[in-house]
Amino acid sequence: MVTVSGRHRMRSSLRGAGAVAAATALVVVVAGSWFGYQQLAGPSCSGRIQLSVAAVPEIAPAVKAAADQWVKDGAAVGDTCVAVNVAAAEPVDVAAAVASKHGATLAGVGQASGTAVTPDIWVPDSSTWLVRLKSGGATALAATTGTSIARSPVVVAMPEPVAARIGWPDKKLTWRDLLAQVNSSKALRAGIVEPTQDAAGLSGLLSLSAAAGATGGAGSAQAQEATIGALRALATNRSSLRQDLLARFPRSSDPTTIANGLGAAALSEEDVIAYNSTKPPIPLAALYLEPAPMPLDYPFAVLPGIEPAKASAAKVLFDVLKTPSFRDRLAAQSLRGPDGNWGDGFQAPRGAPAPAVGGSSAPPTGQGAAELDPNAIQKATSTWSVATQSGRMLAVIDVSGSMKEKVAAANGATRLQVTVAAATQGLQLFDDSWSIGLWTFSTNLNGSQDYREVVPIKPLSSNRNSLRQGLASIKPSSGNTGLYDTVLAAYRKVQEDWEPGKVNSIVLFTDGKNDDDNGISQKDLLAQLKKLRDPEQPIQVIIIGIGTGVSQAELEPITAITGGRPFITADPTKIGEIFLQAIALRPPAPR
């Protein structure tokens, strides 16, 4: 059995380790509670309930101590005795297990182990995990809410000498100030823990993206340039493990070492306190930038499917975690109470927002869970995934006659114009390591052939201008929709020069069903795709359906064979968002 003592050190070594650890993390039984349960389950108990709790490592010791005390004092619901098993588990691991169980897909989160078991109660570090799961398709979680039991503000951690140069601790700094430092000619070396796997990283990404998006006016070319520049700068020093990121901060006061070390990263206040408690040669300053970013709020979430008796026990446990004594347990873990104030023994970083007088209101440590915007979170994770990963893709755009239809919500632009505009804008996010090609299709577009190559698949380092010109040259035809012939030909083309180490994919945009009297049938297409499919050289087919004339039932069998999925939007103006989401949800590249 494994204990959860050891505070942040355990968290540092586990954070972002990936879903492969989910099975281990979720079945660990913490020593103490089980013994208490055995002592309780005597003649006075007419029944027995065993609650399983998965809590993020930094709060798990406090939750365990409170649960142990509750059990020792005679935890019961009516005459039914209660045992509480607390496991320290990384949020990304639990999220992978919950997503797998409820059919959700999360950008940047790997597959759960086949033996992973989801808990009755989950205490992740942030409500963003619940929001992302619901947005990703976990409809069973729709009624699941998580009331905060603790809080840790998200800060920008900097080596103290670096922070002092930009005005800390006296100057009030903003996210725009940080953006200017990151995008300057003498750029500050900023890093991040993968924001698709780390809530503090996601919070920092949202704040920095908002600052970049306001540059030169929201939606402007300057704003997009600032956003892409910031993402690429962060990606240069990203890490999937928090421990690795922390190791990049300078460990010597030598000016060269400081200049070459990591200069800034979005972390939690608790992270900074824990790092500095090890007495490093260069302590970290915690910068509380304005506007205050989304904090870590540690929601207490009862997951779907729990038995009524367990649900009653969970409510009592939640009440235990709202007591003043639990706030003091949190302080020992360098965590604040849910209102942002702290208990006895809390050692705040220099410049930290102080508790309100009398504890009557929360200090400015960021917005609450109720204010989370699912669309902003999804857009941020999707944009990050597209801008920071590499791939090989053939884009295939429908130019059939129906694509001439005008879109009222797009000031009268046609479906084709809206699609091309989305593809052109999306092209800016892909870096030069991508290889991208472009086809169009209809019927009889090139003699009796339904498709036409506009730009061959080549690295963007030499192909970007050709793609821009190719997209600008696309015109609608008067033909029908030769969907099946085109999908088969595109699959064969991508398979010809399949590239290892990258996700090889086809992204096809269409507004209609297959309509080709001289083409192959769906049955023939599926049979040929099954023959061509090579598990050692996978090719993902993503089909983006535009408007109401698209048949999901027609598209799903195609993408089921190839490992992709259809994305359908009735509103063509949403095509850009769908495109980002589709690319972001691709699986990792095979090695």
Image (spheres, helix red, strand yellow):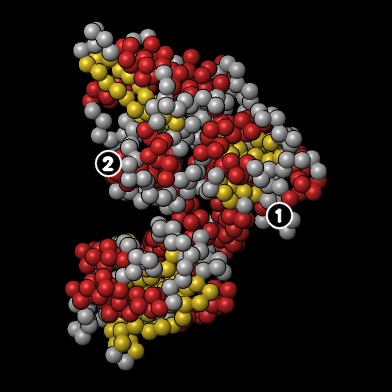
Badge 1 marks a residue whose secondary structure is: loop
Q: Is residue 292 visible?
A: no
User: Measured from the top left, where is residue 167 in percent x and y?
Assistant: 75, 40
Q: Is residue 516 above or below residue 236?
A: below
**544 versus 123 height, above or below:** below
- In the image, 573 versus 66, the foreground residue is 66
Amino acid type of the residue that numbered disc 1 sits on in the rendered structure: Ala
| Quarter location, residue 407 | bottom left
**Outermost residue to the front:** 1
What residue type is disc 2 on? Ala
Question: From this viewpoint, is residue 467 visible?
Answer: yes
Residue 462 % position (x, y): 57, 77
Q: Residue at x 27, y 63 (%)?
A: 560
Q: Nearer the viewer, residue 229 or 302?
A: 302
Q: Are marks 1 and 2 in contact (CB under 8 Å)?
A: no
First in sequence: mark 1 vs mark 2: 2
Which residue is found at the position 39% from the left and 27% from the top?
Answer: 29
Which residue carries the number 2 mark?
140
- Quarter of the image where one finds residue 52: top left
Q: Quadrant of residue 8?
A: top right
The quadrant of the picture occupied by the N terminus is: top left
Which residue lies under the disc numbered 1?
A: 187
Q: Could you tell whether 349 is left or right of 9 in the image?
A: right
User: Which residue is at 43% across, 49% downward?
Assistant: 109
**Mark 2 Cα-neighbour bin, 10 Å: few <14, some 14–19, many ≥20:** some
User: Is label 2 in a helix, a strand or a loop?
Assistant: helix
**Residue 236, image x and y in percent?**
61, 56
Which residue is rendered at x = 22% and y = 73% of the image?
527
Label 1 packing within 10 angstroms: few (<14), some (14-19), many (20+): few
